[in-house]
Amino acid sequence: MIGAGAGAMAAAARLAVAGHRVTVYERSATYGGSVGRFQRDGFAFDTGPGLLHLPAVWRDLFLKTGKEPLESRVGLVQVDPASRHLFADGTAATLPNASRAGVVSALEEALGAGAGERWGRFLVRARDAWDRSRRPLLEEPLWPNWEVLGRNPYPSLRRRGLLRVREAATVREIGRWELADPRLSALLDGCALSYGLDPRDAPASAALLPYMEQTFGSWYVEGGLRELARAVYERCLARKVEFEFDAEVTRVVEKDGRAVGVELADGSFAEAAHVVAGAPVAGLLGGRVWQDRDVPPQRPVTGRFTVLAALRGARSASAAHRTVVHSPDASAEAAAVFGGRAAERPTVTVLRPDDPRTRPDGAHEAVTLTATVTAHAAPGGYGADWTDVALRERCARALIDQAAAAVPEIRERLLWQEVLTPAETGPVPAPALAGGGCGWLHQGNATRLPGLYLAGGWSHPGGGLAHAGMSGALVAGLIVEGPDFRGSR
């Protein structure tokens, strides 16, 4: 197993239960991949995702690998309200958790007559997209005839124009043609952007992302999402999975047309019947590509710009756990993020967990600010140079300025801040989506090189903590049951 990220560990635990001897080689000093933690002066922050969606994925892992509930290993609580949204025109909407009817009522009350009804009708269409694409995108290995997934599963409304009938094919067009309210458009655009998708060209099937959140809810792990990574790691240890940290894999070794093990940076060779890569492997295969098929080129990837803010003063009892401060110019923001630049006024997500494990005492508060930004540029490549001190400082100010709408006097309360950029945390893969000519699919979990499998956010079904857990389940199924494995039932 290459890498100790969430997807790889999910596969490792399942394979160990099935009787396989599993060794994980991780180049860093710890497990979890992007699910990290930063601690200082009694404050603790997640450095990756801060909320959990579709916890059923991880509940299933714990039941299948130990017949005990996830909640016996971590404190899992629903976030209610799910989110508060501050729009550029000064209006605000507070949305309840896991209640589509409640969301419709809240939007109707906050944004005016008709707004909630339009969002409700949109959610019905989004449910159809979810129902049509859930199994092939989340619960099954990528189909051999994957091209059929290029069709749009979202039932767009038909609009008659002067010359032809038009349908919304992208997230942005859904906002303009079906939601018909700039604040509802901002709600949808912001959700897509938070997953690393460009609203201007992401397929309409991205509608299933807000549907998923508003139907199945948003959850917080007490102590932070890092506690989930710890629980999965401990489950692996309990099932006799072995971990080698500070052990960098430099090459996947092939013999007689099959992956037979890995070579490590110290020159040693570890033999294996199966190799599972929890990270991109292009550089480990001597420049050869072993995808299961030839996919269209992926769109530009994004990253996260994060400000970890240690604040003096107690958390307000009325504060929402998650507040989204929307950009006043979503088009300019998307053009910057997907044009290799930093946005002037980004959409900022403010996380304020009411959790004593994240702060030294009740007279302080740990607040995390995040924005989706362009990737870190390789020399001469796409993206921004996030090692540039002036750029980092300018973006940190922009996030704090935006966050002031959600956390009054944040600057006056600030004890210290820590800035994390894509230069430190890397790119963030988007989830797989149907439609759009298959341009939002990822590499399948099986490859053309027998014995080599891919798990994690850079393979099917794409990025996100829930998706990573699904990829681990798919890889384990392919190894245990063989190429005829058709997913969970």
Image (cartoon, rainbow, N blue to C red):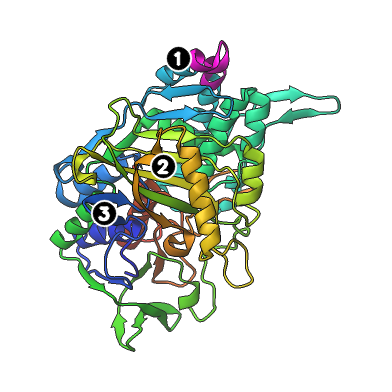
Front in this rendered view, residue 408 or 77: 408
User: Disc 3 designates what residue?
Assistant: 229
Q: Residue furthest bottom?
A: 267
> Is 380 displayed left or right of 305 in the figure?
right
Q: Quadrant of residue 361?
A: top left
x, y percent for residue 15? 25, 61
Kind of element beneath mark 3: helix
Q: Residue furthest right?
A: 163
User: Disc 2 designates what residue?
Assistant: 411
Q: Are marks 3 and 2 in contact (CB under 8 Å)?
A: no
Q: Earlier in the sequence, mark 3 or mark 1?
A: 1
Front in this rendered view, residue 33 or 297: 33
Q: Earlier in the sequence, mark 2 or mark 1?
A: 1
User: Disc 1 designates what residue?
Assistant: 105
**What is the C-alpha distance between the residues marked 2 and 1?**
34 Å
Front in this rendered view, residue 154 or 49: 49
On the rendered image, what quadrant is the N terminus found in?
Answer: bottom left
x, y percent for residue 135? 44, 42
x, y percent for residue 39? 26, 56
> Is 346 displayed left or right of 212 in the figure?
right
Kind of element beneath mark 2: helix
Which range is magenta?
Answer: 108-120
On the rendered image, what quadrant is the C terminus found in?
Answer: top left
The dot on residue 309 is none
Amino acid type of disc 3?
A: Ala
Question: Mark 3 or 2, which is nearer the eye?
Answer: 2
Which residue is at a point 37% across and 29% down the rendered structure image?
Answer: 82
Amino acid type of disc 2?
A: Arg
Amino acid type of disc 1?
A: Ser
